[in-house]
Image (tube, rainbow, N blue to C red):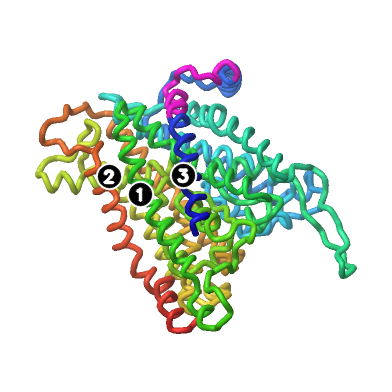
Amino acid sequence: MAKDITYILVFLGVLMLLALPLGHYMAQVFTGRRTFMSFIIRPFESGLYRLCRVNENEEMSWKQYSLAFLLFNAVGFMVLFLLQIVQGRLPLNPMGFGSVRWDTALNTAISFVTNTNWQAYGGETTMSYLTQMVGLTVQNFVSAAVGMAVALPLIRAFTSKLRNTIGNFWVDMTRSVLYVLLPLSIILAMLLVSQGVVQTFAPSVKAQTIEGTEQVIAVGPVASQVAIKELGSNGGGFFNANSSHPFENPTPFSNFLEMLAILLIPAALPFTFGIMVKNRRQGWAIFAAMMILFLVGLGAAFWAEWQGNPILAQSGLGSSTNMEGKEVRFGIGPSVLWGQVTTVTSNGSVNAMHDSMMPLTGLVFMFNMAIGEVIFGGVGVGLIGMLMYAILAIFLAGLMIGRTPEFLGKKLEAREMIMAVIAVIAPAMASLIFAGIAVAIPTGLSSLNNPGPHGLSEILYAFFSAAGNNGSAFAGLNANTVFYNLATGFVMLVGRSATILPALAIAGSLAMKKSVPSSSATFPTASPLFTVLLIGVVLIVGALTFFPALILGPFLEHLLIFAGRTF
């Protein structure tokens, strides 16, 4: 256990050392200031604007920004859907894969466009190299860039005064790709190749097993996809086994790098926020709330896995420590840390099977996703989600002190509150409603591998993952059916649009307001008191919304295990 705790502390230390300068760098990028990368990237950036006839100095209203966001995603969806349908007639398909089934193609297109990267299919047995690269990897870049771009109008709105514009979607997205995602992905891909992650266009390798049968060993352009899937909080592996596959994650060092990449940009964005709103303490207050929630969940999950399964202890087979579903290369500490990292962000990659975790560990992971993945969250969208909770917290503080709530000099009125409530509640409603439908109909239950509360956990996890645009799975549910492909696809769309569009509406509203000077009656939001209030609001809203379902699933399973029953 001491070794695992040391590993976690080193990980968090390295994360902080990298997140602080990255946050400052991104603030320079998104405010249009010159960076050390400008002399290389700026010519390409200007050329793209000229090619696409984009005036980088022309700003958009929040409605224009929202329309650009919707149109861009609609085009990306159509291209990716059609690419899967016709992949059998396209090049770079050495294994000769045919068309992807229509409902799987539809679900996958929605999944990757919404940055969910939920995979109801086996990547190495379904998708050609061309589909993996031109379709999935490209969407890994642009969906992450969209997430970063849509957070910027909300940040700018706090410093804008009496303006009806919030920025330019095309400029924000382009800078996110060119200055942040692409350079980091190149560095990470090279490091992963050095560790043994494969990167080739060669067809799958055929080998003879010791039994004399033929085994097909899939390879492909893996490292390039893994790098951006982690950095962009995408998830979705080249292989079905994801980052538990030795060709995606071959060494303890590659495991450390990939976990670090998942959290790096989400952890840096609060510092970017603080710099851009000219209040660094505010950025630290939000970061502190995220980190405390992260550590509390990690501690609970780590304790549950080390306590292990009491049934094993009673059987006389030795240690009760739960190693089921975990890679012996990594063990309990890195496996639990990865699970916590991936479920607090919108990254669906795994290095262990969550279906095999202890029930309380599964409860932590599900709660992380259910609350909207605001504990760091996806790139950009996670910060948006936490700011929605911050607006709710400040509204409650305003009620307590008897005055109109203010945040960073802007009064929060009915319009902002309604939009914030929609952003918090709509994804939750979608996940719970469709999970309820799934457990009520034979089609939803027919895909389960486990009965009882564990089966309910598998269904809940799937819809929490879809609504949180996470994409990880318990792996005990066959979701590649028409029902689950359509149901989770719809929930993914709600989770993405119902978070982003209300945030853009709030940005448009705040940008048109004048700044209000703070006074002795203003609630201090850049303070430990605000951090505590923010954490309390996240936990209370999450508990009131999801605990009834979680009690019937993972918590009930926990109690039954101690009664000697398993599922």
Q: Is residue 112 left or right of residue 558?
A: right
Q: Is residue 441 left or right of residue 241?
A: left
Q: Position of residue 492 (x, y in %)?
A: 49, 54
Q: Is residue 277 left or right of residue 450?
A: left
Q: Position of residue 339 (x, y in %)?
A: 51, 56
What kind of element bears circle 3? helix
Q: CA distance from mark 1 to mark 3?
A: 12 Å
**Residue positioned 60% across, 63% down in the render:** 326
Q: Position of residue 50 (x, y in %)?
A: 57, 18
Of residues 392 and 12, the one drawn nearer to the viewer in this rendering: 12
Question: Crowding at label 3, few (<14), some or many (≥20) Cα neighbours within 10 Å?
Answer: some
What kind of element bears circle 2? helix
Label 1 or label 2, whichever comes before in sequence order: 1
Q: Is residue 408 magenta?
A: no
Q: Based on the displayed image, in which of its 4 quarters is residue 431 positioned?
A: bottom left
Q: Nearer the viewer, mark 3 or mark 2?
A: 3
What kind of element bears circle 1? helix
Q: CA distance from mark 1 to mark 2?
A: 9 Å
Query: Over which residues does the magenta segment extend?
Result: 24-40
According to the picture, the residue beneath numbered tag 2 turns out to be: 531
**Residue positioned 29% across, 50% down in the render:** 535
Pick out the residue farthest to the front. 2
According to the picture, the residue beneath numbered tag 1 turns out to be: 292
The residue under label 3 is which amino acid type? Leu
Q: Position of residue 282 (x, y in %)?
A: 29, 35
Q: Is label 1 in contact with label 2 (beta carbons under 8 Å)?
A: yes
Label 1 or label 3, whichever comes before in sequence order: 3
Q: CA distance from mark 3 to mark 2?
A: 20 Å
According to the picture, the residue beneath numbered tag 3 turns out to be: 12
